[in-house]
Image (cartoon, helix red, strand yellow):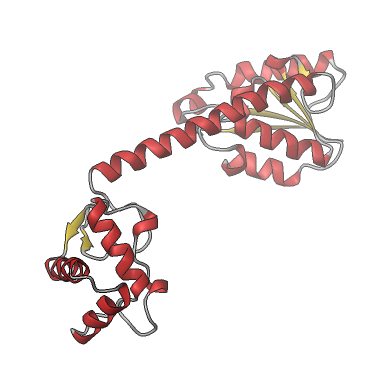
Amino acid sequence: MTVYAYTRVSTARQASEGESLDVQQRQISGYALMHGLTVDETVIEEGVSGSVPVSDRPAGATLFAKLKAGDVVIAAKLDRLFRSALDALQVVDDLRSKGVKLHLIDLGGDIAGNGLSKLFFTIASAFAEAERDRIRERISQVKADQRERGRFLGGARPFGYQIAADGELVEDATEQRTIAKMRALRDDGLSLRAIAEALAEDGISLSHVAVKKVLERSSGGETTAPEQTVTAAQAPLGSRW
């Protein structure tokens, strides 16, 4: 069994001047002494933000790679190790599966192997779920904002538009004329296949499925919805679309 003390400071200045590192080390030493443990190695994470997952930190990655069953990790506070409840939930679950004990002094002790673990996981799971919901909401809001501003959201380029350097969709004059012709042919009662055949005579290769999607998009005013994007997979082999 190896006992590791993990300490972290967020800035290089804190690391060089010893701010909080010394306090964390004293807290861990006192805790270890009270619980009959001897710290074998102290891991110091210098100038690394808490927003970085522990597995991606230089010292943290090295530490977690060598942990084995029976080992103990002691940290002064939850936020010294984890960036979020979701991160904590995933890491602690991994440590439990490896048989590694994790002691967080601010939470009262071993959260991976004693009575505190059930309480911790219940609370952390609730916060992690709330965190996932917030992430989904933020992504949805960003996409909605980008869509309203006419920005390209990824995937295949919509027929009739080019993608500017800043990600904005800009109308392609030639392809817009093709779309106008497609609408006119449709208004004349031509089927989707007939429209595709008419375009082929002009050297424009679009499948009838692609024609349908372009017409639906142009009539609805949407330009960036993924389900309305013409993809290469929907066009005949060897064609542009």
In the rendered structure, the answer to whether residue 175 lies left or right of residue 239 reads left
Q: Which residue is depicted at the point 21% across and 86% down?
A: 201
Relative to 168, residue 59 above or below: above
Q: Is residue 182 visible?
A: yes
Q: Is residue 157 visible?
A: no
Q: Which residue is depicted at the point 34% across and 69% down?
A: 210
Q: Residue furthest front?
A: 189
- Residue 191 found in image quarter: bottom left
Q: Quadrant of the N terminus?
A: top right
Relative to 15, residue 170 above or below: below
Relative to 1, residue 16 above or below: above
Q: Which residue is depicted at the point 46% across and 28% down?
A: 11
In the rendered structure, the answer to whether residue 238 lies left or right of residue 19 reads left
Position of residue 232 measured from the top left corner of the image (x, y, whole percent): 38, 72
Say which of 229 and 152 sits in front: 229
- Residue 30 found in image quarter: top right
